[in-house]
Image (cartoon, coloured by chain):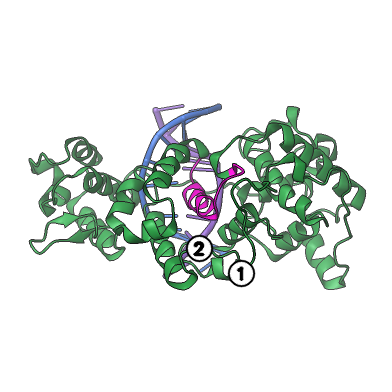
Chain colours: A green, B blue, C purple
Amino acid sequence: MRPRLLKGEPNPGTDPAHYSGHVMNFSNPPAAPSEQADAAADHAPWPDPDTVRTMHRHIIDWFTWNARDLPWRAPDRTPWQVMVSEFMLQQTPVVRVLPQWKRWMQLWPEPSDLASATTGDAVREWGRLGYPRRALRLHAAAVAIVERHGGEVPSDYDELLALPGVGSYTAAAVSVFAFGDRQTVIDTNIRRVQARAISGKALPSKGLTAAETRLAESLMPDDDATAVRWNIAVMELGALVCTAKSPRCDICPVLDQCAWVAAGRPEPEYVPRGQAWKGTDRQARGAMMAVLREATEPVPPEALLSPERTAWKGAPHAMEQLRAIGAPGDQLERCLEGLVRDALASRDPEGRVTLPG
DNA sequence: GACCCGTGGCT
DNA sequence: TAGCCAAGGGT
């Protein structure tokens, strides 16, 4: 097992002292003809090394002075703290994650602590973060960490990837941010910065392409510690400056190198499909989950299936929300079945509904 | 690749 | 106001 960051050890992800300054070596990407053609089809001509070196310097310098002070970036953070933050940050803004993350770290400071809890506790303490299946997967990951890795978050990318709820992004993020490994992190922020600054497009393609991955790998600084810092710096730039809706180009450290700006900020090539909400199963499931979280006793099924006709006082606020949706009974039935099938809810011997555990 | 899965702040 | 969007993963 490779050494992990210990308390008090420098944080290669955020400590300026770990940043190797301006001694960054960049090599040209592999020049295999097929890859060149593939890449050229997906973005503007491959960036020249001087431009890339300038971007390295400007973005990392910008990060040095503008990085947010987040607890999962603290010098004494643990791999488990990083992993929990990455789960919570999946599709969820930092401001909403912060209080919930602190609560979880108090309740379950080690993977074994969470593994010993019930999945129902995990789902309840997930609160209103959204996508509660993440709580189930994080709990399952904690169990797997105890069973397969002696209760220590693994540092190996493939071992991380094998954990429930850990995909390519989260595996790379934990490798890099918790262990300082050299991995290429690709998230929606990095994809957007790359699309604009390098490829000259307003938005990245709908799905992650192989060419995009190769481009991200080719952009990695040669120096390992600098590469670690590069990942987090580009992500932060995408989160704070190169945002999806109204990018703050006026304060961008690579405005002069940006291919999208140089091209006159062309419009997106497609219109992102909006996320429907009103009347969807997701809305109904969310409201039912709110009832289960708020409930202090098992919930009679009729309270969930006919909320407007059932006077049940066990979760008044959440019940009011559920009634307000006005979802038809068959939809509510389908949703309850789905929640039970997904192990987000369970029935007790009397048929009443509870959080699992 | 398309689609599903929560939630709330922002414009 | 209604829609957009956020450190994705699983199917």
Name the chain under label 2. Answer: A
Left or right: A312 in relation to A225: left
Answer few, some or many: residues within 10 Å of disc 2's Cα (few below 14, many 20 plus, some between 14 and 19).
some
Q: Chain of mark 1?
A: A
Name the element at disc 1: loop
In which quadrant of the rendered view does residue A175 lie?
bottom right
The amino acid type, in three-letter code, at marker 1 is Met
Looking at the rendering, in which quadrant would you find the C terminus of chain A?
bottom left
Residue marked by disc 2: A152
Q: Which residue lies at the image location 73% right of the left edge and 36% below the top edge? A: A64
Q: Is residue A86 left or right of residue A220?
A: left
Is label 2 in a helix, a strand or a loop?
Answer: loop
Residue A52 counted in the magenta span: no
Find residue A335 and report its horizontal and vertical position in percent. 26, 56
- Do the numbered discs 2 and 1 sit on residues whose CB atoms are within 8 Å? yes
Q: Position of residue A113 (x, y in %)?
A: 37, 56
Question: Can marks 2 and 1 be said to lie on one chain?
Answer: yes
- Where in the figure is residue A185, as x and y percent of width and height? 66, 56
Q: Which mark is residue A1?
A: 1
Magenta range is A73-93
Is residue A244 shown to the viewer in this render? Answer: yes
The crowding category of the residue bearing disc 1, from other C-alpha atoms within 10 Å (few below 14, some 14 to 19, many at least 20), is few
How many labels, in total? Answer: 2
Q: Which mark is on residue A271? A: none
